[in-house]
Image: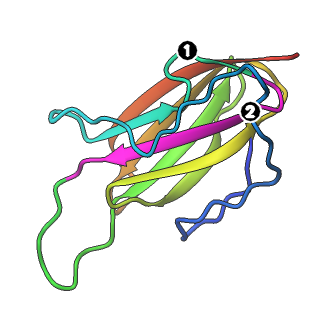
């Protein structure tokens, strides 16, 4: 599970706590996720799909949105994006919700409960309906 305080309506993420990756655990630097032309959204993590994280590790989560926008002035608001986190069969928890114009990354810390965690990113329409989704899974374990 991820520990993070939501700051809705802003692109800044405020963390409940921070930690450095443990020695010997490689963490890649990422700033966006590749999105295929046929996709509208992608979500990724710094250790890649099926990466392994230990409780206390820092994780970087990125979401990239590729939704056509009308070119007018003033520009329309960016597409609304929601990311949920679900460990095994637990209830999904929203960990991010905000407008994302192209890509956005934030950091969180791995906390219990542990297990297979699935992040799902949704692009939402003006009424909160789902336009597109993307997901990535990773494993969180105790020391």
Q: Which residue occupies 51% across, 49% down?
A: 105
Cα distance between the residues tagged 1 and 2:
17 Å
Q: Nearer the viewer, mark 1 or mark 2?
A: 2
Q: Which residue occupies 78% across, 25% down?
A: 23
Residue numbers of the magenta segment: 54-67
Q: Is residue 115 above or below residue 94?
A: above
Please tell me whether mark 2 sits on a helix, a strand or a loop. Answer: loop
Residue 79 lies in the magenta stretch: no
Q: Quadrant of the C terminus?
A: top right
Please tell me whether mark 1 sits on a helix, a strand or a loop. Answer: loop
Q: Which residue occupies 80% across, 42% down?
A: 19
- In the rendering, which numbered label is found on residue 21? 2
- In the rendering, which numbered label is found on residue 59? none
Categorize mark 1 by other alpha carbons within 10 Å: few (<14), some (14-19), many (20+): some
Residue 104 left/right relative to 7: left
Q: Quadrant of the N terminus?
A: top right
Viewer-proximal residue, 103 or 28? 28
Viewer-proximal residue, 4 or 54? 54
**Which quadrant of the structure image shows residue 84?**
top right
**Which quadrant of the structure image shows residue 54?**
top right
Residue 11 position in % (x across, y down): 52, 65
Residue 52 left/right relative to 135: right
Residue hosting label 1: 50
């Amino acid at each position: 599970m991820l520990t993070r305080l939501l700051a809705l309506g802003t692109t800044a993420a405020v963390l409940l706590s921070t930690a450095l990756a443990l020695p010997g655990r490689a963490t890649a630097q990422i700033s966006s996720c590749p999105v295929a032309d046929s996709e509208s959204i992608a979500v990724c993590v710094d250790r890649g799909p099926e990466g392994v994280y230990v409780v206390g590790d820092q994780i970087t989560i990125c979401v990239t949105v590729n939704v056509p926008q009308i070119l007018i002035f003033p520009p329309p608001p960016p597409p609304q994006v929601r990311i949920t986190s679900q460990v095994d069969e637990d209830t999904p928890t929203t960990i991010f919700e905000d407008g994302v114009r192209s890509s956005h990354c934030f950091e969180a810390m791995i906390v219990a409960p542990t297990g297979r965690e699935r992040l799902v990113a949704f692009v939402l329409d003006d009424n909160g309906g789902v336009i597109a989704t993307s997901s990535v899974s990773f494993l969180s374990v105790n020391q």
